[in-house]
Amino acid sequence: MKKIIFICTLLVSLFAMSGCSDDIDTPVLTTDEYPRILGRWPDKQEDGTLGKFSIPLNQVLSINVQYTPAELCEGTWYLDGREIHKGVGLTYIPSTIGTFHLELIVKTPTKETTREAIIQVTEATE
């Protein structure tokens, strides 16, 4: 009887271990993937207007985002329609008080995704 229980336990263990696989299915990313922007971005207001980054004149605005698929994406940052930076993340040092339109466009060779926000620069703090 002990031999039968031992053999059954051994068989169950073998079946359980043979069902496991160490192979990890890594997704293959192509140029047909939509680019994604990962990171914090201000939400739109309840009335539908763009979200705001608000900073005083003497502060630095640092926006850190990531793109995926990273090997296939290029990010371009625009301030009031003018290209100001290419790459991941943006460090903006305001030179004047005012409201500015910020746009991030991330492109793969075939698709693109955008994020928009308002930068509200207020008076300098002490």
Image (spheres, helix red, strand yellow):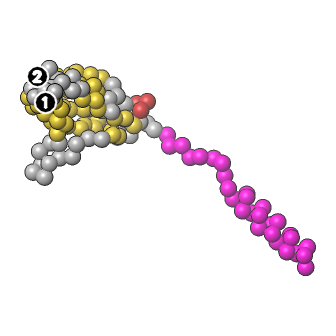
Q: Is residue 49 visible?
A: yes
Mark before the other along the chain sequence, 1 or 2: 2
**Vertical relation: 6 (above or below) 65:** below
Amino acid type assigned to the residue bearing label 2 in the image: Thr
Residue 61 on image: x %, y %: 24, 29
- Residue occupying the point 56% across, 46% down: 25
Q: Quadrant of residue 99?
A: top left
- Residue occupying the point 17% across, 39% down: 52
Crowding around mark 1 (Cα neighbors within 10 Å: few <14, some 14 to 19, many 20+) is: many
Q: Which residues are magenta?
A: 1-28
Residue under pointer 1 = 121
**Vertical relation: 9 (above or below) 26:** below
Residue 19 highlighted magenta (yes or no): yes
Q: Nearer the viewer, residue 65 or 70?
A: 65
Q: Nearer the viewer, residue 122 or 72?
A: 122
Residue under pointer 2 = 96
For the N terminus, give its image quadrant.
bottom right
Q: Relative to residue 29, is residue 57 drawn left or right?
A: left
Crowding around mark 2 (Cα neighbors within 10 Å: few <14, some 14 to 19, many 20+) is: few
In the drawing, what numbered circle is on residue 52?
A: none
Q: Quadrant of residue 70?
A: top left
